[in-house]
Image: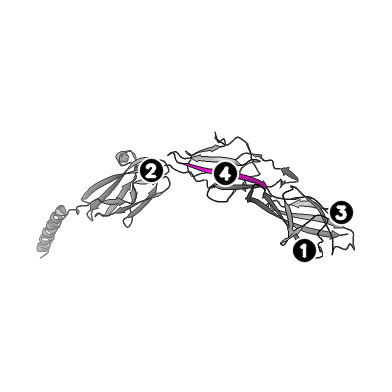
Amino acid sequence: MKKYINIFLGICLVFLLAACEKDEAATPHASMTVNKDLLAINESMVVTFNGFADQVVVYTGDESHDYELRDQNNTGFVVNKGVFSYSYSVPGTYKVVCVASTHTDGATDLKRDTCSCYVKVIDDQTEIEKLSCPQILYDEVFAEKLNESDWLMTLPRKVKYKTSAMTISLSQRLRFYIQSELTKVFIDGVEYSSTGKYNLENDLAIKVQSDFGTVRDYRLFTIYYPEFKSMSILGVEGTLVRNEFKYDSFVYEFTLPAGSDVSHVTPTFELTDATEKAYIGDSEQVSNVTAVDFTQPVTYKLVGVDPNNANVRAESNVEIKIVFE
């Protein structure tokens, strides 16, 4: 009986091996669509696989992902759920190759099919994302974007640094944050230099030119945060205290004799520029004219406006602190 069982098992094994030898992978079909064949750098390309395969790999054609160089350690990207997205950081024309493959369960048979298309990537980056004065402390002073073409750089006159107050001039280096390193910047018609200093007392005409050749024009305006140049209450000169982190915030400290009546005082003050004005709430304050009740917390709002451009303005807040002794 045992002999017949062994014979039967042997026959089954022969049939099984014969079946395996005839087992073939299904025929794959490589087919894909690309949402765009003209892309900007850092713009997403979306590849959709429309064929049939057990596994799909896409070679994007740029450095380290070139299908023709796959034997030289260039690799593709495995596509999950039939959709793959990718962006290029360098302009050029790239051959995108889709490899569709099928295989048997035992990997005894493997079949492949490929298809390809070309995409062109251009560098037309002309957008300024950020603009700063990098030499002011640790690159902490950034311009504000007023609209699509105008930027406003608001500078402190001095900044608190350790035990001193550094004076900030209107001759400053500039730093442009633009996505592409190939983009060129021109200031007043001259190519920008990261080590050069620019006179921010004047409005600067900025032209940004992409590697593709597109051009965009900007203008940079600059204004100082307004300050009290001096201020006295009841004949006592105060001391301006700067905020180390907020350049538009100040405290003016006064030490007055005990018993001083500060309920109706007309402070004497001078602002740093003739165009600047001082307010408490919405009421304009005039030096040696407007009376103030300092028994309550008082904060002045200082406003500076470029006389030639109403959009170029800056505001500061000055808290009054009085100590009696």
Q: Which mark is residue 121?
A: 2
How much space separates mark 3 and mark 1, taking CA atoms? 18 Å
Q: Which mark is residue 236?
A: 3
Instruction: Give amino acid for label 2.
Output: Val
Q: Secondary structure at mark 2?
A: strand
Instruction: Give amino acid for label 1.
Output: Pro
Q: Which mark is residue 56?
A: none
How much space separates mark 2 and mark 3, taking CA atoms? 68 Å
**N-term mark: 2 or 1:** 2
How much space separates mark 2 and mark 1, taking CA atoms? 60 Å
**N-term mark: 3 or 1:** 3
In the rendered structure, does residue 301 fall within the stretch colored magenta? no
Position of residue 209 in the picture relative to residue 121 (left or right): right
* Label 2 neighbour load within 10 Å: few <14, some 14-19, many 20+: many
Instruction: Give amino acid for label 4.
Output: Arg
Q: Secondary structure at mark 3?
A: strand
Position of residue 276 in the picture relative to residue 266 (left or right): left
